[in-house]
Image (cartoon, grey):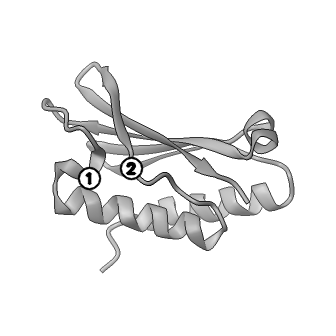
Amino acid sequence: MNHVPDPVLAAIDGLGRSILVDDPTTLDQRLRSDFRVRIGCDPTALDAGTASVAFRLEHGTPAPTLRGHGSFVATVVDGVDSRLREWGIEPPDAYTHRGADDGWQIYAGRAALP
């Protein structure tokens, strides 16, 4: 069962295509009402060969890594990572807690671009 919304998958496909034609774009999508993903890909990231991948989860209690929030969150993250890999984008091994912003826990890492 796919837990990643179709618009998010389409946005990842758009990001993958934009990288292939050297016209990178930033992805910012809602996974659920309390869960978002942002992939910051601009010309500088493309030149460096890495892009920031950040998830924001509206949750009062942080965990050391995003997957520490349980199997449902892990399944969604795995779905995003899987789609990135289909485009040759290698996601980070883990998304570590980077802080909080107004009740949103922020988890991030760097993905290797093709």
Q: Identify the secondary structure beneath mark 2.
A: loop
Between circles 1 and 2, the one closer to the viewer is 2
Q: Is residue 24 left or right of residue 110?
A: right
Q: Which is more toward the observer, 94 or 16? A: 94
Looking at the image, can residue 26 be seen? no
Where, quadrant-wise, is the C terminus in this rendering? Answer: bottom right
Checking the image for residue 67, the label placed there is 1
Q: Position of residue 1 (x, y in %)?
A: 30, 80
The image quarter in which residue 17 lies: bottom right
Looking at the image, can residue 27 be seen? yes
For image coordinates 77% across by 56% down, the residue present is: 18
**Residue most toward the bottom?**
1
Q: Identify the secondary structure beneath mark 1.
A: helix
Checking the image for residue 94, the label placed there is 2
Instruction: Tell me the distance, in whole angstroms, between the alpha carbons under discs 1 and 2.
Output: 8 Å
**Residue most toward the right?**
21
Q: Are marks 1 and 2 in contact (CB under 8 Å)?
A: yes
Badge 2 amino acid: Ala
